[in-house]
Image (tube, rainbow, N blue to C red):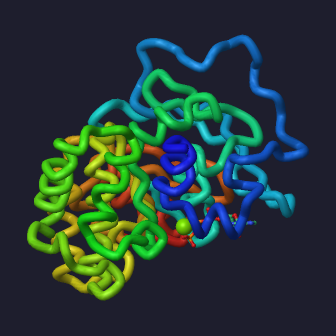
Amino acid sequence: MAERVVTEAHSHVHQHVHAHPHEAGHEHHPGELPRHPGDGHFAGGAAAIEIRHLHFRYPDGLEALKGIDLSIAAGEKVAVVGPNGAGKSTLLLHLNGIHEPTHGTVQVGDAVVDRSTIREVRARVGLVFQDPDDQLFSPTVFEDVAFGPLHMGVAESEIHDRVERALAAVGMAGFERRTPHRMSLGQRKRVALATVLSMDPEVLVFDEPSAGLDPRGRREVIAILRALPQTVLASTHDMRLVADVFPRTIVIDGGLIVADGPSEVILADDELLEAHGLERP
Ligand SMILES: Nc1ncnc2c1ncn2[C@@H]1O[C@H](COP(=O)(O)OP(=O)(O)OP(=O)(O)O)[C@@H](O)[C@H]1O
Ligand SMILES: [Mg+2]
């Protein structure tokens, strides 16, 4: 029972799961290729994230990812940029198994993401959706932030501490008894981050962490992201956020990685930026 809660509810995928049950990893896609049976689910000595030959086709036939290869070392902070529809969100949703590859593999640490590892993967990878309302569903901030650790089996005696630490990390200490849906967007985004920090993940994945925030909210998010010790992968259209937080940038367009390198190099390449609908910070 707890497992269902963790794998379905806590990943807070309501919208995705309910809107697109076939992409949610609960059923086999008719066209899905079998994954090398026998090569086992765990491999040793891995990068924090290792993606090989990742293709993903939505059920309507659209191929959103067309062969992504990406290796991210532990502790790296990597931005994913690219025009609307490039495949950024689709890529990020593979990191905790919301989408399953049509072809290729996604590995987090030593675990290849698939049904047999999903519980472990979701304990390791905290995914923060663009819209905090996809992540927050409890009557109080405390309950939302306590949800993950509770359902991961963390001892009750430790829950309070976990919640306090996560809320302090995002500057939301004191908001425990507030109702998330009555808070501002910036506050809800911070609490949404706390709901995954409380699970002590090794990897944090953000879909547009600064979208919709006012300048102060943006600066606060930048400070929070910079302070995170975890491996961080985030999609964004905010080039100043990229410059301020992420030493490495990946440009995606048309379901392919078209550039991958130091952010200062990528952000100075006007031709590249223009070719992919981006602009200098
Ligand atoms: N549920 C879906 N069913 C079918 N196609 C989809 C679905 N979600 C996204 N797509 C398509 O997949 C492609 C990649 O979309 P995705 O949301 O990953 O882009 P993105 O880079 O995150 O864009 P944005 O900057 O607008 O957030 C687009 O062509 C999009 O129309
Ligand atoms: Mg997106």
Q: Is residue 258 left or right of residue 205?
A: right
Residue sitting at 46 percent across and 54 percent down? Answer: 10
Q: Is residue 6 left or right of residue 15?
A: left
Residue 94 as seen in the image, left or right of residue 187: right
Q: Residue at x 82, y 28 (%)?
A: 34
Say which of 71 and 2 sits in front.
Answer: 2
Up the image or down, 240 lies above or below 165; here it is below
Q: Residue at x 53, y 30 (%)?
A: 107
From the top left corner, tell me how far across and down residue 64 is, in percent: 71, 56
In front of the other: 230 or 52: 230
Is residue 258 visible in the rendered image? The answer is: no
Side of 183 relative to 123 (left or right): left
Which residue ends up furthest to the right in the rendered image? 30
Q: How many marks?
A: 0
Answer above or below: position of 235 versus 152.
below
Identify which residue, 28 or 177, lies in the foreground: 177
Place of residue 88 in the rendered image (x, y in percent of width and height, measured from the top left): 55, 59
Residue beneath the point at 16% across and 81% down: 216
In which quadrant will I find the N terminus?
Answer: top right
Residue 269: quadrant of the picture: bottom left
Kindly indicate the quadrant of the structure image that contains residue 276. bottom right
Percent position (x, y) of residue 82?
A: 52, 63
